[in-house]
Image (tube, rainbow, N blue to C red):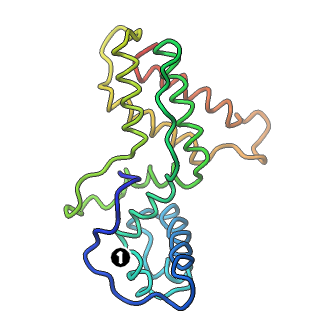
Amino acid sequence: MSLTIEYGSEKKRVGRPRDGDPDETRKEILRAAERAFAAAGFSGATTRQIAGEARVNVATLHYHFGGKKGLYRAVLAEVALGELPPLSEAGSPTDRLRRMIGALFDFTAKRVSLPRLALLDDLAGPVDDTSEPPVEDRRIGLMGSAVRSSRNVGGAVKAGPSLPPDEAARLIVRMIDLALVDPPGKDAPAGARDVGTVRESVVEAALRIAGVV
């Protein structure tokens, strides 16, 4: 899955934009598509449904995004906008990795649709499309770099076999997504963990997955 791939490579665009502000029309389509894909994934959502919710015709949707695949990629890019946290150089290798895991948790928590879209994309994305190169979640790339760094500069790798850094990174990011898909809200029953407690639990579990504690 990629959250940065360009969608301008779609082959052909048809239709014309409706009257009004084209930028606002595009934003309306993206908002409707984000809700639809987050609810049903790539396979379950339809361009007709999305166009109807955005109050445009299907031709307008195709004009702006070239089709369902282009729209899907645009939504993935939109929900993950923002600068990823930088790799820290202060403290011990384990402390640096701990901060990175927490920072990626916070980054994801601020993007409400991102966890669900990322998980759905892994489970039911457009895997039959071989016209585009395989793409990757940029959070996983950053986490992989953090895991490798923590091991390469004297991290306390636990005894026994450890996952390769990229596999550990993917598992950590997906664990963050799972923790944030439906976090406890204000109406949660008494005793339910708040997001801060969930964050701490995720960080501790992720350090074990990374093999540094």
Amino acid beneath label 1: Gly
Q: Residue at x 23, y 55 (%)?
A: 133
**Horizontal and vertical percent position of residue 25:** 54, 79
Q: Residue at x 57, y 30 (%)?
A: 102
Residue 36 as seen in the image, left or right of residue 64: right
| Quadrant position of residue 8 | bottom left
**Horizontal and vertical percent position of residue 159:** 35, 8
**Horizontal and vertical percent position of residue 141:** 36, 38
Q: Secondary structure at mark 1?
A: loop
Front position in the image: 88 or 151: 88
- Residue most extreme to the left: 130
**Horizontal and vertical percent position of residue 169:** 39, 32
**Residue 78 sits above or below residue 152 on the image:** below
**Residue 11 sits above or below residue 181 on the image:** below
**Location of mark 1 (residue):** 67
**Residue 155 sits above or below residue 64 on the image:** above
| Quadrant position of residue 27 | bottom right
Front position in the image: 20 or 175: 20
Residue 181 as seen in the image, left or right of residue 57: right
